[in-house]
């Protein structure tokens, strides 16, 4: 176990609440965040999210606001998905691309109004994203990094709606995925989105920083009989990995495109106006992609981890980007980039685990059925 | 936290127990299993493998991380806990009992006595 030097790390408004709950604080993306909570642990927290309801502090995420009469045109030019189809209160996943098509970041786009869009970006990339956007935007003066003005709490799991209805009822409850509504909580406005990173039903709630702790505490206090539990980054990662959701720095990075990371559904290359990177992406697709993301299930015993080589007949044909022992499916799973001719489910490969070639097979993902807590 | 008095301990959170016949049983401590979280896989050396005090002898994997196991003493592995193949969670549930890992036939005297006793280990983990 190595000691972490807690210098220069940022803290969310919920830091003291995590410590009071026995949160084991670690450095993550420049922030001091709970990896798990004492007396529970990753697997218990993971299962609570799949079967009851989990609370996640995601205040480290970045928030960028795009304003003005041309906000839609601006955002549509910046990101890969088609923002022009969003109505007020709609949301979509997208990739922010470099001119060469590779990913600056992946993000969520929320249309708050005709002249106001909220971009929710990864904590580790917030400054990079903002600098990129300022450099390429049509109206950089209308785009603001508002990350310090928002705390964010995710409420995820089959009991999420019941819990939120008790504490801050409002229009988002009952909506399908990818909407955002304003709820009132004690006279303050919360932005409640029906989005998440777990595969379960639930909400990501943008909260004024000074209200984060009282809101968090009220959710915990109100949900005892619903099985509510605070969830650390450890379970956040295994939950997203079971769903095959990409994590920037693993499945996406500055040398990787959304096409390779299999989020092509969010890469609208036919968007009439195009977007930054779209021409390069079309050229890359026409030329043939050098790698594609697949799901792998390890057939031998062991646990795949990121950067382990993927082998075919002793030859390296790819690399694991994320791996774990799935708490829900109870088996070792991984996402990996492999040669594009090796993506068929059933393809037999191997993963080099500390010098031993362990058998693996290409499988479709998600690795679990969302909402069922079953493999 | 559980630190049995009849065992000796390494800085890396392994324990060793003197079986009185020149062999020593080895596992990881309660503190270690708690830090690791739910253990899903334990990789151990085959019987007959020679291990060196302070050298890597295996790997323990939890859902969140992979950790090396370091031998408390030098010698030859004369038994390994086959039960951990099917039930690695025994390391969490019973780290000093069902969760034992290997038994080592010591090749040098004095290495066991040089390990931390329970009182020193308790200080080491901040108890």
Image (spheres, coloured by chain):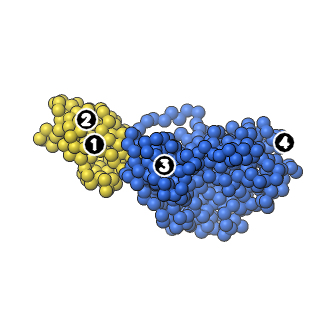
Residue position marked by numbered label 3 in the rendering: A323
* Numbered tag placed on residue A372 in the rendering: none
Residue that numbered label 1 is attached to: B45
Q: CA distance from mark 2 to mark 4?
A: 65 Å
Q: Nearer the viewer, residue A113 or A312?
A: A312
Horizontal and vertical percent position of residue A55: 56, 57
- Is residue A331 toward the left or the right of residue A161 in the image? left
Secondary structure category for the residue under label 2: strand
Q: Badge 2 is on which residue?
A: B51
> Going 58% across and 48% down the picture, which residue do you hit?
A340
Q: Chain of mark 2?
A: B
Q: CA distance from mark 1 to mark 4?
A: 62 Å
User: Quarter holding the N terminus of chain A?
Assistant: top left
Chain drawn yellow in the picture = B
Residue name at image x 81 percent, y 41 percent: A137
Frontmost residue, B37 versus A278: A278
Quickly name the residue at label 4. A138
* Disc 1 with disc 4 on a shared chain: no
Q: Name the residue at the left extreme.
A: B21
Label 1 is found on which chain of the structure?
Answer: B
Q: Give the Cα distance between marks 2 and 3.
A: 29 Å
């Amino acid at each position: 176990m190595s000691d972490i030097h807690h210098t220069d790390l940022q803290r969310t408004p919920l830091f003291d609440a995590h410590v009071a709950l026995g949160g084991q604080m670690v450095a993550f993306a420049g922030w001091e965040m709970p990896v798990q909570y004492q007396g529970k642990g990753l697997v218990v927290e993971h299962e609570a999210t799949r079967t009851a309801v989990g609370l996640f502090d995601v205040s480290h995420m970045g928030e960028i606001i795009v304003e003005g009469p041309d906000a839609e045109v601006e955002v549509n030019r910046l990101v890969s998905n088609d923002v022009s189809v969003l109505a007020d209160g709609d949301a979509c996943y997208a990739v922010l691309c470099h001119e060469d098509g590779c990913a600056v970041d992946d993000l969520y786009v929320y249309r708050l109004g005709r002249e106001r869009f909220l971009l929710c970006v990864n904590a580790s990339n917030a400054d990079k994203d903002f600098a990129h956007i300022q450099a390429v935007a049509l109206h950089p003066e209308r785009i603001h990094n508002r990350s310090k003005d928002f705390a964010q709490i995710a409420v995820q799991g089959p009991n999420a709606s019941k819990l939120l209805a008790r504490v801050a009822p409002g229009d988002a409850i009952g909506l399908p995925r990818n909407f955002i509504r304003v709820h009132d909580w004690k006279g303050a406005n919360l932005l409640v989105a029906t989005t998440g990173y777990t595969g379960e039903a639930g909400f990501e709630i943008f909260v004024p920083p000074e209200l984060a702790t009282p809101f968090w505490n009220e959710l915990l206090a109100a949900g005892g009989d619903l099985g509510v539990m605070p969830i650390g980054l450890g379970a956040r990662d295994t939950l997203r990995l079971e769903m095959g959701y990409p994590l920037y720095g693993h499945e996406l990075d500055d040398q990787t495109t959304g096409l390779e990371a299999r989020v092509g559904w969010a890469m609208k290359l036919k968007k009439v106006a195009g977007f930054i990177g779209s021409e390069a992406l079309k050229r890359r697709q026409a030329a043939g992609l050098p790698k594609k993301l697949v799901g792998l299930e390890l057939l031998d015993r062991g646990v795949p981890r990121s950067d382990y080589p993927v082998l075919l007949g002793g030859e390296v044909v790819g690399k694991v980007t994320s791996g774990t022992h799935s708490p829900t499916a109870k088996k070792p799973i991984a996402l990996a980039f492999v040669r594009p001719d090796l993506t068929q489910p059933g393809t037999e490969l191997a993963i080099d685990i500390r010098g031993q070639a362990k058998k693996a097979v290409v499988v479709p993902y998600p690795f679990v059925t969302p909402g069922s807590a079953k493999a | 936290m559980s630190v049995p008095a009849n065992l000796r301990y390494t800085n890396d959170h392994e324990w060793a127990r003197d079986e009185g016949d020149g062999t020593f049983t080895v596992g990881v401590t309660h503190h270690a299993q708690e830090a690791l979280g739910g253990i899903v896989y334990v990789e151990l050396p085959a019987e007959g493998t020679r291990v060196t005090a302070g050298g890597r002898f295996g790997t323990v994997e939890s859902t969140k991380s992979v950790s090396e196991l370091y031998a408390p003493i030098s010698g030859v592995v004369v038994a390994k806990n086959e039960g951990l193949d099917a039930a690695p969670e025994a390391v969490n549930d019973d780290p000093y009992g069902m969760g034992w890992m290997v038994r080592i036939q010591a090749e040098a005297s004095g290495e066991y006595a040089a390990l931390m006793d329970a009182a020193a280990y308790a200080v080491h983990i901040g108890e």
